[in-house]
Amino acid sequence: MIGISKLYCGTVEQSDPLRYGRRSKDLPSHLLQFSQDKKPVVVWNVGRRCNLHCVHCYSHSKDQTYTGELDQAQGKRLIEDLADFGAPVMLFSGGEPLMRPDLFDLIGHAVNRKMRAVVSTNGTLITADVAARLKDAGLSYVGISLDGLEPMNDRFRGLPGAFQRALDGVRNCLAQGVKVGLRFTVTRMNYRDVGGILDLVRAEGIPRVCFYHLVYTGRGSKMIDDSRMSHAETRATVDLIMDRTRALHAGGQPVEVLTVDNHTDGPYLYLRLLKEDPARAAQVLELLKMNGGNSSGVGIGCVSWDGSVHPDQFWRHHTLGNVQERPFSAIWSDPNDPLLSKLRNRKPHLKGRCGACKFVDICNGNFRVRAEAVTGDLWAPEPDCYLTDQEIVL
């Protein structure tokens, strides 16, 4: 996660996370990515069912009943273990989490245990009443997915009218005072809508937007050939996001803008700042080192609907254990899992460009699961790193 507004527009300074000692339990939410202890933010897929059929869904979700999901008692035990373990955020995802009837009780339980509760949703089910219930439950944030303007989003989502229903969900959250933001997965199909989404953010007064680079898992694994962006297209899109973020801030609308799932964005932003503002670039480099790059198996983990634990929500082909058999805290702390051990000490295993890159300390080898999806080799160079060989040499 790269905070474009934090780093490029200077809304976070190097001293800000230091003031809190860089401890996850003490940091405000907008500084969590700079924590030193890297207690995991945990994505819990509370159910697999979804009312949409998105082309890039990592969970292959459909609008049907699934069995074998954690029940409420098991879910509450999971939350209690995570709270005791020091996990700062419980991110409720799916499928579509709002299709789970007891979601509000689970959110309230997490909040009562002093965790920040976040929901990742397609937004189509957020009526005014649902927004009010989310607020009453103590939710910290709701991220609503829009993968383009109306025609493109509805094509992505597999349902005509999904865009308008999601936008109504955003407006209902804003009306209830629930912090809300957009989530946009950038692909070759929809990257031309990035500017339009930023126009929408400005017009609607939406305080946050996250642009996700596509990870090739689930149904997204079928998009490698036809929807994978070229390096030039990615660079141009990241430049556009930075330019438009700066324009929003200069215009008195300090929207929080982030890019997610490609840590190349960090050194790329730093290299751009070296040309524009070298003094700021030096501060940004230190913040990027605090960020630490990709955090799969370190600062982010996933619990699937059946209790399986994964290094992140995209790594479903590798299971570390199951919370029905051992607590998450025990699974996450087990020193004997070979994948976790390597993810937590990647440098000796990275090959090619990634192994030789001068930015490895601020990228951490980027998304290993993406390298595996494209090349078949977990430790191969990150295929979607768009820096040139000249930019990464020591």
Image (cartoon, rainbow, N blue to C red):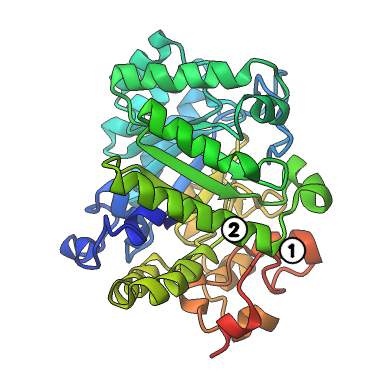
List x then y, in percent, for residue 70.
Answer: 56, 30
Name above or below for residue 304 compared with residue 175: below
Spatial CA distance of label 1 from label 2 is 25 Å
Does dot 1 land on a helix, a strand or a loop? helix
* 367 left or right, relative to 37: right
List x then y, in percent, for residue 390.
Answer: 61, 85
Q: Residue at image x 39%, y 71%? A: 273
Q: What residue would you read off at disc 1? A: 372
Residue, far top: 129
- In the rendering, which numbered label is found on residue 236? 2
Name above or below for residue 50 compared with residue 237: above
List x then y, in percent, for residue 241.
Answer: 49, 51
Foreground residue among 314 and 267 = 267
Foreground residue among 21 and 185 = 185
Residue, far left: 19
Name above or below for residue 44 compared with residue 88: above
List x then y, in percent, for residue 52.
Answer: 67, 22
Residue 265, visible in the rendered structure? yes
Q: Say which of marks 1 and 2 sits in front.
A: 2
* 190 left or right, relative to 93: right
